[in-house]
């Protein structure tokens, strides 16, 4: 169940934003309801965006769902032979694993210099839906660099995030994505806004 008091305290900046703790306490099963409440036209736009990114990166045999949450996007990856799913929240990983037992759900690397527990060049595409806006500014570049590490040369990083200039209290951050992509070693192929969200594709 979502801990609403804790959520409100973080949003009001009465408590510090600790990402693993925050998203665990947002709940697993309860968070599914949030995904179900997203307007249909936005969902269609998201699905079409990711499908196009996958087509442009063909052949795609290995994909990482970065910040998979409860596995809302798993049906979009159904035709990809090897799918990995990463999330920092244990409660959401548990739900995601039940959604599709064939997906390899992974957690943050507990030791070593790398954040993602995947080998270098392990993925053809990394897809991320409404996740990067929740990464603290001081942690964004290191996270992007590790995403670039697990991408094969020419691989795509497809991102859906908050529109430019949007930043609300507590856990949403307004990043300079073009600059961050460049610093991490990604060529920005597209950057557009629609349905109240921002869509970006980078290439390694």
Image (cartoon, helix red, strand yellow):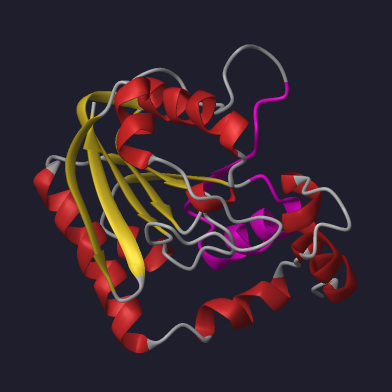
**Location of residue 193 with respect to 123 vertically, above or below:** below
Residue closest to the eye, 105 or 142? 142
- Residue found at the far front of this picture: 165
**Residue 171 appears in which quarter of the rendering?**
bottom right
Q: Which region of the structure is painted magenta?
A: 88-110
Q: Residue 170: where, in percent of width, then height?
A: 71, 57
Q: Residue at x 62, y 40 (%)?
A: 136
Q: Residue 19: where, in percent of width, then height?
A: 72, 47
Residue 92 part of the magenta-drawn span: yes
Of the 4 image quadrants, the one containing the N terminus is bottom right
**Location of residue 138 with respect to 65 vertically, above or below:** above
Q: Residue at x 46, y 82 (%)?
A: 38
Q: Residue 121: where, in percent of width, then height?
A: 33, 21
Q: Please give the count of numbered marks on the rendered protein.
A: 0
Q: Is residue 176 left or right of residue 94?
A: left
Q: Is residue 186 left or right of residue 91?
A: left
**Location of residue 78 with respect to 17 vertically, above or below:** below
**Location of residue 204 with respect to 3 vertically, above or below:** above
Of the 4 image quadrants, the one containing the C terminus is top left
Q: Residue 90: where, in percent of width, then height?
A: 74, 51
- Residue found at the far top of this picture: 112
Residue 155 part of the magenta-drawn span: no
Q: Residue at x 27, y 78 (%)?
A: 44
């Amino acid at each position: 169940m979502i801990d609403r008091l804790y959520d409100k305290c973080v949003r009001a900046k009465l408590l510090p934003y600790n990402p693993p703790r925050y998203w665990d306490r947002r709940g697993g099963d309860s968070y599914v309801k949030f995904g179900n409440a997203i307007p249909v036209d936005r969902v269609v736009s998201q699905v079409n965006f990711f499908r196009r990114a996958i087509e442009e990166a063909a052949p795609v045999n290995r994909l990482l769902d970065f910040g998979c949450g409860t596995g809302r996007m798993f049906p979009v990856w159904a035709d990809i032979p090897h799918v990995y799913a990463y999330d920092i929240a244990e409660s959401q990983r548990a739900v995601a694993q039940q959604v599709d037992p064939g997906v390899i759900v992974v957690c943050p690397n507990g030791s070593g210099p790398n954040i993602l527990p995947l080998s270098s060049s392990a993925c053809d595409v990394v897809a991320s839906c409404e996740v990067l806006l929740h990464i603290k500014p001081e942690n964004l570049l290191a996270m992007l660099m590790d995403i670039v590490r697990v991408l094969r040369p020419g691989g795509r990083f497809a991102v859906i995030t908050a529109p430019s200039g949007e930043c609300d209290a507590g856990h949403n951050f307004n990043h300079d994505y073009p600059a961050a992509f460049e610093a991490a070693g990604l060529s920005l192929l597209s950057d557009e806004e629609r349905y109240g969200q921002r869509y970006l594709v980078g290439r390694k």
